[in-house]
Image (cartoon, rainbow, N blue to C red):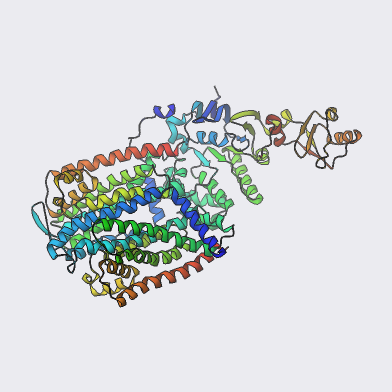
Amino acid sequence: MALMAGTIHVVEYNALVFRRIWRGSIAVSFFTPLFFLAAMGIGLGSLVNRSSGGVNGVPYLDFLAPGLIAAACMQTGAVEATYPILAKIMWDKTYEAVLATPVTIADLLRGEVVWNTIRMCIVATMFWVVMFLFGVGHSLEALLAIPASILTGLAFATPIMAFTATRRNDSGFAAINRFIIIPLYLLGGTFFPIAKLPLALQAVAWATPLAHGVALTRGVVLGNLTSTEAVMHVLVPLAYFVAGLLIARALLLKRLAK
Amino acid sequence: MSVLTHRRTSLRVPTRSMHMVERNVMAYRHNWIVIVSGFFEPVLYLLGIGFGLGSLVPAVSTGGHTVSYAVFVAPALMATSAMNGAVYESTSNFFYKLRYAKTFEAVIQTPVGVEDAAMGEVIWAVIRGCLYSIGFVVIMQALGLIASPWGSVLSVLAALLIGFAFAALGTAITTFMRQWQDHEIVTLALQPMFLFSATFFPISVYPPVLQAFVEVTPLYRSIHLIRGLTTGQIDAGLLVDVLYLVLLGLVGLAVASLRLRRRLLK
Amino acid sequence: MGDSNSLILARQLTKRFGDLTAVDGIDFEVAKGEAFGFLGPNGAGKTSTMRMIGGVSPVTSGLLTIFGLDPAQHGPTIRARLGVVPQADTLDLELTVRENLIIYSRYFDLSWREGARRADELLEFVQLQERAKDKVDELSGGMKRRLTIARALINSPELLLLDEPTTGLDPQARHLVWDRLYRLKQRGVTLVLTTHYMDEAEQLCDRLVVMDKARIAAEGSPRELIDKFSTREVLELRFPIDEQPPLDGKLNDIAERIEVLPDRVLLYTGDGDEAIAAVHRRGLRPETALVRRSTLEDVFLRLTGRSLVD
């Protein structure tokens, strides 16, 4: 379909660039979960399980692992939406070159989203494999952790892409990392239940896509999600994704079509 | 190449390095939010890890004492924060300047030499790390997580040393980087180190063989140093930590200077 | 040995990058107060030579002294008295226009107050006062070049090195730059520049070396070079494509020298009009015939068989 051709070309381009570094990237995607689950899941987990019998009865490792997958996708989605894209707009001027071809700005955006999804898919799948090896999530339903975390990541990717489209330098990225990614990572339900936070912060946490993404992923791995909960946990990230996509489109058009 | 060997080697004191610091201060004046927001982090980490996880783990035994989880983990977070600040500044920022902004191309055409530039970047990274460490200590003191006021002062000094060591190391590593994605290597090394250096659980969780291995890694030594200072457990082991970090810093500096010279003066 | 007025002295200066010889044993001297040029096409070795003079590229072999000093031993001292305008812009993108000048003054150990004063002075000199508070990436190419020149002057250098100073600039910007450089020359600043533009070389330089393929092909003032390697006038003939007649000797005694180019025939002679008449007498009917004065382009063609612009 000619409609997809432009998008596919953008993905191909990214894949080509990725070829140079894929080994390192895959390695990181494998070792990161390995380290986290070993250190936090087992090492820290031994302390948690000994003191409190796990989290609401669930062994800490089982509680932590799915949360980490969602968080990892958030981080991947966010990072891939910042520097690489700004580099293509401003420094390498790749977009400028590409737009001289039949590829349109909408194609560019779609292509970047698809590529980001592929990256997150790799991260999530590797994480799922490691989790499986550690004995967690041995059910068919647990495979849903992969799409669940990808959705989480996308909910961050598109709004951040919109932000990147307005940038003239990379200083804002540090701010995003510091004020959004890291706080969410630490307090968004990955390492300990959101219920342990003060009420005001709980409300803020639940307004973000990560909390829902983590809950969704954890739910499918542990198999303890009701349908209503599942629907809500899907809708919130989805809303962020769609809104981000529309805004990113408008801003990229404004930035690149001169 | 014969010309280079006639030169005296580069451990002379670089006097003009402060100009690089001046330059960075000037640049950050447009960007001060980034600096200020850095104080945000200690609060976050203490909240999230110290008290959040602490709600799941009430007490930890370390070096014969039993302490609350927050007291146990806070110094580790401070040491890590000093490390991260220094590494971030000496890798991401430095690489950006080297590869994209060509900040150094202009500088080397002035009396400021390559060694001065490298040293200046390291000093700047240390200064930034220091600011964050002071913030950390202030908050820890306020939350009652430090055993004595001496602990506060000494741990800030310790954080300076940690920053220096990692900044030198980071700068050296960055001179080997060719493209942005090379950062994955830094993350690859930093991450397991962060997780396994007795940060979140005492080293006694490990079998003895692993313990020995962890004990020679830089972050463990940094954490050991600051934890000893904040919990008031002062012993000779802390001296080992100090010597280790000083050596690491000097080696990193030498490598960075050499590599930078090769890279910029072709 | 050079005389004590030599600001730069080079003997058998060589620069190699692995197997590639960028500068092959060249000799030249630059006297104080003159405007000296390296003229040659891209890849001739001009930039490599400039980088060695500027002390940012180590000399592979040969002698090079600047202000009588060896750059390998006295780098910082030499650089303190130099100003450099590099080929690619190396302005600090995170600072404003004025801040770029001020921080640069600090690299030369000027005081903050002195630096600020010089900065304002120089901004006026290059006519960028209005843009003092702007970020560098908002400037046009010509403005960035002017800022780079201003920056190179912050330490009141005795010697100014300019690598392709007007490449990429529009004609108006070029003339502004030339004008400023000319004023500097009048103030006694020694200028060393590289260029592949013959008009720039002719306008600005007192003396030139013509560089090609890592070597010096000739040396002298623009006038001397033209007198020596070319005639007073050149007759350019263009024939309709595919109809360029076999010349074999037909035109030989009309001109001192003939160059057959892909699109034209150049007849080097003392008297262009006489040559045109002679061409017609021989029965040749060129499409166009143009008489012009010799330029450095002709000198380069004579010396190397190629044109300056490849």
Q: Does residue B115 appear anywhere in the picture?
A: yes
Q: Does residue C115 appear anywhere in the picture?
A: no
Asked if residue C192 is positioned above or below residue B101 in the image, the reply reads: above
Q: Is residue C105 left or right of residue A203?
A: right
Q: Is residue A131 left or right of residue C21?
A: left
Residue A237: give x, y in percent of width and height: 37, 70
Q: How many marks?
A: 0
Residue C109: give x, y in percent of width and height: 41, 43
- Residue closest to the far left: B64
Residue A146: give x, y in percent of width and height: 34, 63
Asked if residue B119 is positioned above or below residue A147 in the image, the reply reads: above
Image quarter in which the C terminus of chain C is found: top right
- Residue closest to the far top: C1
Residue at coordinates 82% horizontally, 30% vertically from top-left? C255
Residue B28: give x, y in percent of width and height: 39, 56
Q: Can you tell which quarter of the image residue B75 is in? A: bottom left
Image quarter in which the N terminus of chain C is found: top right
Q: Is residue C210 left or right of residue B193?
A: right
Residue A120 or C100: which is nearer the viewer? Answer: A120
Residue B59 or A232: which is nearer the viewer? Answer: A232
- Residue closest to the far front: A140
Q: Can you tell which quarter of the image residue B38 is in? A: bottom left
